[in-house]
Image (spheres, rainbow, N blue to C red):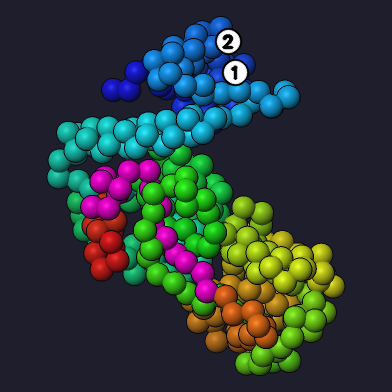
């Protein structure tokens, strides 16, 4: 079991506020300070500092948090093995493209085993990474851009990131210019989405932003996005599996903007996560 002062440290890493940490742990604020000072003395490193009035983690704190996240994952896995020796219980996160269009066959196969339990969370990249850090997931399958320095990971697959429009849209099956693209009504995912971040990065690399579009809207649900694209004349950008999900969608490409995105398995402890991934998706671990 992790030392109670380590729990204080991890909670402060999440809250980044001494008062909120004390309230969450039902202790005094000076008690939180004492726990952090003990760890700083033990490890011989400053862990938190103020930049003006903003509390920030030092590089040493980031490294220590990554280590403790890994240890906490090992501890939970060991405890689960003691309690449920004959049961495999996985807590899996997936971003929306992957969860709704890519790993459904793996989910069906996994839950068909009576000794398997699954908690599946489908959400955006930012939310899933936060859940990993809080040890609320065993691993996540994430599309697009994330901080690879902060999380152990390995590649699942690469997919083309393409423009999507309705079958009768003038762009259907064509290669168009970036200038033509900006005249359209664009639908993007919500902030925190890896898909949105990938599109923003591609446009930014060419000196533009979402504000360059005549109009854009943010929608978090892929079914709604697909409906708007198929039947309301809008366009969007998504991975090819989304395009294959409906007969009334077509793809288009933008000249000099060929994009491929990564799908990655992300976790806090490779030794624990990789066998779990192998059970969940035997051909892709």
Q: Is residue 179 left or right of residue 82?
A: right
Mark 2–mark 1 Cα distance, whole angstroms, equals: 6 Å
Residue 176 rendering spot, x and y as whole percentages = 71, 88
Give the residue at x 67% y 74%.
236
Give the residue at x 63% y 73%.
237
In the image, the segment drawn in magenta is 260-275
Relative depth, front residue between 109 and 239: 239
- Find out whether residue 4 is within the magenta segment: no
Residue sitting farthest toward the left: 86
Callout 1: 10 Å neighbours few (<14), some, many (20+)?
Answer: many
Vertical relation: 153 (above or below) 175: above
Give the residue at x 74% y 86%.
177
Q: Secondary structure at mark 1?
A: helix
Vertical relation: 120 (above or below) 225: above
Relative depth, front residue between 201 and 278: 201
**Label of residue 103 in the image:** none
Residue 273 rendering spot, x and y as whole percentages = 30, 49
Q: Secondary structure at mark 2?
A: helix
Name the image quarter holding residue 83. top left
Verify CB contact (< 8 Å) between mark 2 and mark 1: yes
Residue 282 in view in this figure: yes
Callout 2: 10 Å neighbours few (<14), some, many (20+)?
Answer: some
Relative depth, front residue between 125 and 179: 179
Q: Is residue 98 left or right of residue 234?
A: left
Quadrant, the C terminus: bottom left
Quadrant, the N terminus: top left
- Find out whether residue 271 is within the magenta segment: yes
Vertical relation: 122 (above or below) 222: above
Residue position marked by numbered label 2 in the rendering: 29
Residue position marked by numbered label 1 in the rendering: 18
Residue 42 rendering spot, x and y as whole percentages = 39, 15
């Amino acid at each position: 079991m992790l030392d109670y002062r380590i729990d204080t440290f991890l909670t402060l890493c999440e809250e980044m506020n001494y008062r909120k940490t004390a309230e969450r742990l039902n202790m005094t604020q000076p008690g939180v300070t004492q726990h952090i000072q003990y760890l700083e003395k033990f490890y011989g490193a400053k862990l938190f500092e103020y930049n003006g009035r903003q509390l920030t983690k030092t590089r040493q704190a980031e490294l220590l948090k990554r280590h403790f996240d890994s240890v906490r994952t090992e501890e939970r896995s060991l405890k689960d093995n003691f309690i449920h020796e004959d049961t495999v219980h996985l807590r899996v996160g997936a971003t929306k493209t992957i969860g709704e269009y890519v790993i459904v066959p793996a989910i069906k196969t996994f839950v068909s085993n009576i000794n398997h339990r699954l908690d599946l969370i489908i959400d955006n990249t930012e939310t899933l990474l936060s859940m990993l850090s809080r040890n609320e997931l065993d691993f996540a399958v994430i599309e697009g851009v994330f901080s690879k320095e902060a999380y152990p990971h390995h590649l699942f697959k690469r997919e083309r990131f393409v423009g999507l429009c309705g079958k009768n849209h003038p762009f259907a099956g064509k290669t168009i210019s970036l200038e033509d693209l900006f005249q359209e009504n664009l639908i993007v995912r919500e902030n925190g989405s890896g898909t949105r971040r990938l599109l923003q990065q591609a446009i930014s690399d060419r000196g533009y932003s979402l504000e360059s579009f005549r109009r854009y809207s943010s929608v978090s649900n892929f079914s709604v996005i697909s409906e708007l694209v198929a039947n309301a004349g809008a366009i969007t950008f998504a991975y090819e599996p989304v395009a294959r999900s409906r007969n009334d969608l077509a793809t288009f490409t933008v000249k000099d903007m060929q994009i491929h995105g990564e799908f990655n398995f992300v976790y806090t402890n490779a030794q624990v996560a990789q066998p779990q991934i192998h059970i969940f998706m035997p051909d892709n671990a």
